[in-house]
Amino acid sequence: MYYMKGSWRTINIESLRMFCLVVDEKSISKAAQTSFVSQPSVTRQIRAIEDFYGLPLFERKENKLTVTEAGRKLYPIAKSIINQFNSSIETMKRMNEENQFTLPVGASLRVGEYIMPKLLGEFKKKYPEAQLSLKIGDTKKIIDCLSQDLFQIAIVEGEFDHKGFQTEVLMEDELILIVGPEHPWRQREMIDFPEVVNEQIVRRIANSEFRVRVEKELKKHNLLEKISSYIELETTQAIKTAVEYGLGISFVSRMAVEKELETGRIIEVKINNVKITRPIHIVLKEHRFSHLGTEKFVEMVKEMPRYN
């Protein structure tokens, strides 16, 4: 908490953090949503900073929130204060007890559901004293949170802007064609890609990164416009269940159906000369303070057989 000379008005680090978040999100409502607090709470913190400095930091023009000149000058300073504060916390934690540390991680949806439980389980076995936390969301949201220093490492699927980050491919996830156990293709070793146009496709809702990647492959083979029968579902679990009960065929992440493939509830069908893959990245900020838990986690992941 800081005190203005000659005044009892105060400002705290969380208010500065919230100010930076509003600038990054260009919206009070989005900043509130990201931080899981109410909009009035965000507004109060912004007003507290403005009262402290005696200058407006934002203004509304045509229902659009813009940063004032004072806000633009304060932003890099506030960012630096926040980074130094975070660094001081981590430094003191190290001095307090080297073997006790935290590991906050961000992960995209399918990574969080199917990969992170195993990775965090292995990490906890190796470092039982570690305090773990995992935030799951779409890739864009997770990368945004990483930019805002809500955690130090992210593992994500899909496309994102790599500028300002250190990225490395953790593994390649394959998108495979699945059918139900009663489907005529269940005994086929392989099909030709054009055969899918005669089937009902069970697919994700529009704008899904997963769906975009599959449709890009279909378009490359001039098949996308030829498919006329679809069922659209919101979750991977719903898609798996629909395919299992014969409502159509689908393309899904291999890691999402490993158990169903083992039990025979879902059948994988190979496609002649077609393989759809996508990278899963480990992402770190280029400029970040040292974080013991993150360093140990990256070290562990790189030593795991599946990493290579």
Image: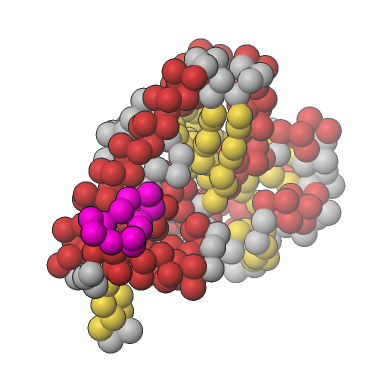
Q: Where is residue 229 in the image (x, y as percent from the top left)?
A: 64, 67
Q: Residue at x 38, y 49 (%)?
A: 1
Q: Where is residue 205 in the image (x, y as percent from the top left)?
A: 59, 64
Q: Which residue is drawn at 46% across and 39% down?
A: 151
Q: Based on the picture, tell me whether residue 74 belongs to the magenta stretch.
A: no
Asked if residue 154 can be seen in this view, the reply is yes
**Up/down of 68 relative to 201, above or below:** below
Q: Where are the magenta residues, as a range?
A: 1-12
**Up/down of 243 relative to 25, above or below:** above
**Residue 175 falls left or right of residue 164:** right
Q: Residue at x 59, y 37 (%)?
A: 133
In this view, the residue in front, 19 or 307, is: 19
Display colour scheme: secondary structure
- Residue sitting farthest toward the front: 6
**Up/down of 124 relative to 186, above or below:** above
Q: Based on the picture, tell me whether residue 7 belongs to the magenta stretch.
A: yes
In this view, the residue in front, 72 or 14, is: 14
Q: Position of residue 84 (x, y in %)?
A: 30, 37
The main secondary structure of the magenta stretch is loop
Asked if residue 223 can be seen in this view, the reply is no
Q: Where is residue 303 in the image (x, y as percent from the top left)?
A: 51, 13
**Residue 260 falls left or right of residue 103:** right
